[in-house]
């Protein structure tokens, strides 16, 4: 057993980051590191960061400031993910106690980088890769080692920054999935859409799809391990292009959904421009595909959609919604909305509100526009005051709450199949999730103890704006 180096990893941001962290954790465990629960216990402190909005970016710098003093104990700090890629070596200036800055397409070099950290640092206490019979010499340089070594500046500064044009993916060989029942599979990385407000094309590089063979092999492997729910991930899943040309995204959905043992298949995130009718047909045809689509709209105004460079109109978006509504199954629809994009007038905003009514979403994620580095919208005047953005956000959320109250009420009296996700001891309720991605908490008769990860039937008896309550059908 390894008593040696320990690491702590905190993840910010989206599901892509959560899954990247699972891959990073798996890689570090393979390298002989041990994961610990607190920064105080760790030799190496890693933050997998998000830069989608300014607030998310600031969080990591606050965290780094909070724990700076631990550097005196020989702890090392690493910044991974989107802030790492976006800010690059500037992070060393802002947080001089950081030793490692690494973008997501460079994670496969982490073993070499860690070896550099160990050999450059004076805390290395476990055998080198060579001693452990692992191949691959460190290839990265140490561009910032000219600074004097003081307590405030670490021995070594290592960067792994990605080229936007990279063809590399971070494979899942060692992914340490945290949930034994449902797990993610990345099918496509990066984004080529360049929406005017979005930093992702700059932090995660160009679109790279994995072969359908490797996706299917991973799905089968997960099914063999007992996973019953899979979520296919990508910034833009329906731009998926099989490099072997064997299947379309909809065909991949059907193929993964038919892997024996898989009971539920989800996918996120979809872009309306690439959302074909064949996806809805696949949902209708393959029972394991969940009755839920997340289709970010961002705005209900054609003027704003155009300024956002979203590549579709309100009408084209609503056509996709109509496909889903005419499906044989009731598909729950959720979305993302941005308020206060440059030049959004009250009338544009009203069109967004009116779109919420027209679609009748089962959930939305809503955000105030936040100017991001490198993005085309940065040259637009961010003239809408923050108070006005907050007001619009508040109005939007209130309207959506009313829609959800009405939508969720319709489930009262119905029986839903849920995957048991855990127990809320304080309420003495079990937590379940429906195929439509709704939380359905439920009570059980005294003698019954449902097993986490199994599927049970629940009769819905009460509804709330964001969840349902029911009782186990015995
Ligand atoms: N400001 C506000 N929200 C943003 N999003 C992406 N970039 C920005 C930004 N600059 C939102 C979009 C996207 C979601 C993941 O985050 O709604 O769909
Ligand atoms: Fe960002 Fe647009 Fe790409 Fe989504 S599709 S990641 S919003 S650029």
Image (tube, rainbow, N blue to C red):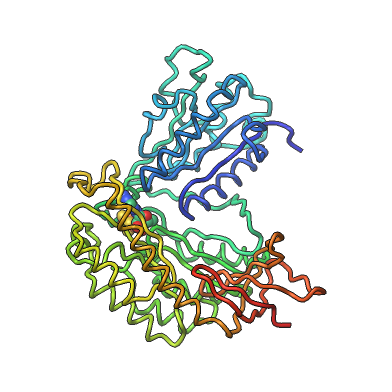
- Relative vertical location of residue 158 with respect to residue 275 in this rendering, above or below: above
**379 or 111, which is in the foreground?**
379
Q: Could you tell me which residue is drawn at 61 percent across and 83 percent down?
A: 415
Of residues 237 and 87, the one nearer the viewer is 87
Q: Nearer the viewer, residue 325 or 221?
A: 325
User: Which residue is found at the position 66% from the left and 34% from the top?
Assistant: 6
Total label count?
0
Whether residue 191 appears in this view of the structure is no
Q: Who's the residue at 53% across and 71% down the image? A: 464
The quadrant of the picture occupied by the N terminus is top right
> Can you give x and y, in whole percent of width and height, for residue 471 in the image?
67, 78
Residue 300 at x, y percent in the picture: 26, 67
Where residue 223 appears, as percent x and y from the top left, is 63, 67
Ligand 1: image quarter: bottom left
Could you say where residue 234 lies in the image, as x and y percent from the top left? 42, 59
Q: Is residue 357 left or right of residue 290?
A: left
The C terminus appears in which quarter of the rendering? bottom right
Residue 222 in view (yes/no): yes
Question: Residue at image x 45%, y 62%?
Answer: 211
């Amino acid at each position: 057993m390894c008593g040696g180096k320990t690491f702590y990893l905190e993840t910010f941001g989206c599901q892509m980051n959560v899954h990247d962290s699972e891959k990073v954790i798996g890689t570090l465990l393979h390298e002989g590191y041990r994961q610990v629960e607190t920064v105080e216990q760790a030799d190496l402190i890693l933050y997998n960061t998000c830069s989608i909005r300014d607030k998310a970016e600031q969080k990591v710098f606050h965290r780094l400031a909070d724990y700076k003093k631990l550097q005196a104990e020989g702890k090392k700090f690493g910044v991974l993910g989107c802030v790492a890629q976006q800010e690059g070596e500037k992070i060393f200036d802002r947080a001089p106690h950081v030793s490692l800055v690494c973008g997501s397409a460079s994670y496969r070099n982490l073993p070499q980088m860690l070896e550099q950290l160990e050999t450059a640092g004076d805390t290395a206490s476990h055998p080198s890769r060579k001693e452990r019979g692992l191949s691959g010499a460190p290839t990265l340089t140490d561009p910032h080692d000219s600074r004097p070594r003081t307590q405030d500046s670490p021995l070594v500064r290592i960067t792994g920054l990605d080229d936007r044009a990279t063809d590399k993916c971070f494979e899942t060989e060692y992914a340490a999935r945290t949930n034994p029942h449902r797990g993610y599979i990345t099918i496509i990385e990066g984004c080529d859409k360049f929406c005017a407000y979005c930093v992702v094309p700059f932090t995660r590089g160009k679109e790279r799809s994995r072969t359908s063979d490797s996706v299917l092999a991973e799905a089968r492997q997960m099914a063999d391990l007992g996973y019953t729910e899979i979520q296919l991930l990508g910034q833009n899943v329906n731009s998926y292009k099989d490099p072997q040309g064997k299947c379309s995204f909809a065909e991949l959905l059907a193929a993964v959904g038919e892997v024996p043992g898989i009971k539920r298949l989800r996918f996120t995130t979809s872009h309306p421009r690439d959302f074909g009718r064949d996806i809805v047909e696949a949902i209708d045809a393959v029972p394991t595909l969940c009755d839920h689509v997340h289709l970010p709209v961002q705005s209900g105004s054609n003027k704003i959609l155009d300024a956002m460079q979203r590549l579709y109109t309100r009408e084209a978006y609503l056509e996709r919604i109509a496909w889903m509504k005419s499906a044989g199954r009731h598909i729950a629809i959720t979305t993302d909305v941005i308020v206060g994009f440059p030049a959004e007038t009250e009338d544009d905003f009203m069109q967004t509100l009116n779109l919420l009514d027209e679609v009748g979403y089962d959930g939305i994620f809503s955000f105030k526009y936040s100017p991001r580095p490198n993005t085309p919208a940065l040259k637009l005047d961010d003239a809408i005051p923050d108070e006005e953005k907050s007001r619009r956000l508040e109005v939007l959320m209130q309207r959506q709450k009313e829609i959800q109250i009405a939508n969720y009420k319709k489930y009262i009296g119905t029986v839903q199949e849920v995957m048991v996700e855990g127990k809320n001891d304080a309420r003495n309720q079990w937590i379940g999730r429906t195929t439509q991605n709704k939380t359905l908490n439920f009570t059980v008769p005294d003698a019954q103890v449902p097993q986490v990860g199994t599927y049970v039937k629940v009769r819905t008896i009460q509804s709330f704006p964001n969840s349902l309550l029911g009782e186990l059908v015995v």
